[in-house]
Image (cartoon, rainbow, N blue to C red):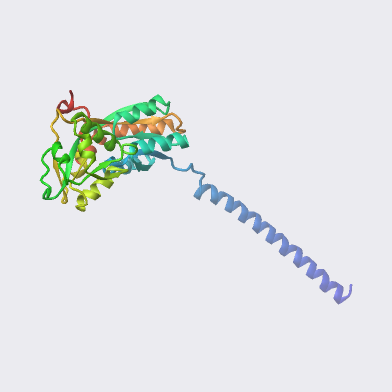
Amino acid sequence: MTKVQTFMAMILLFSAITLGCIQEEQKQLATIDETAGELTQPATEKPQSLLVYCGAGMRKPMDEIGLLFEEKYGISAHYNYAGSNTLLSQMELTQEGDIYMPGATYYFDVAKEKGFTDYEQLIAYHVPVIAVPKGNPANITSLDDLAKPGVKVIIGDPKAAAIGNLANKILEDNKIHEDVEKNIIARGATVNELIIYISMNQADASIIWEDLVVNSEKIETVAIPSEQNIIKIIPIGTLTFSEKNDAAKKFVDFVASPEGKTIFEKHGFTSYPNEKHEN
């Protein structure tokens, strides 16, 4: 064998040994990577999230309840806040979501008649009051004062918000609807819009939920006598087209639990049941 042939043979042998080592190392690394993946990156299910259609007037207690529920059960709540009737229309259009919580049982009953809801709990009372700017510049002391010439009134839109429909009914029952109608300068799609108008002195009076202005620095309230008022109950329930029935029912029960109702009371609501508001 010549020197050249000997040199070439050595190169081939070295290449074969090197290639074998590389392949073995790659095989070992592949095994390690595979094992490491099993140990450090286990397959996990995506955390559950519930879509809750909720009346805008319950934002404060429901935001707090949602955080506690997620902390306790690992299930988050995604809220769609709007007027109760607006939410009902959205549900009918999309046929999606897990829970419905309107500002009054009327809307829940409509949803039930349409076959959208099944399991239900009652949570708290919604008590209408007259809201006026701090200092009560128009000297509003009763429902009748809303009909006085020159008084600027803002009312909820009855086609969108529970409080709008209810305010109309209260005014009609007290036979002052036509006179107050002359003083209405705007209608809000949510009760929160009404609060903004009053707090900014853009109107003299509105009819809103009592719980929304507890400890407010910009709004005062005038109570409506029980014989002139219409007090509603806030319901919550699961939707029939939910694909997360167990989790949805668990959320409803959590809102209706003593822990959930205590949060509502913390934010100015009277929890259900209560003799004070029973006829």
Can I make out residue 262 in this image?
Answer: no
Q: Is residue 273 above or below residue 89?
A: above
Quarter placement of the N terminus: bottom right
The answer to which of 253 and 88 lies nearer the viewer is: 88
Percent position of residue 109, x then y: 34, 26
The residue lying furthest to the bottom in this view is: 3
Q: Is residue 45 above or below residue 13?
A: above
Residue at left 46%, top 31%? 241
Quadrant hosting residue 258: top left
Quarter placement of the C terminus: top left
The answer to which of 149 and 58 lies nearer the viewer is: 149
Residue at left 38%, top 30%? 238
The answer to which of 228 and 53 lies nearer the viewer is: 228
Residue at left 16%, top 25%? 275
Q: Is residue 196 above or below residue 171?
A: below
The residue lying furthest to the top in this view is: 279
Describe residue 78's horizontal placement relative to residue 269 as left or right.
right
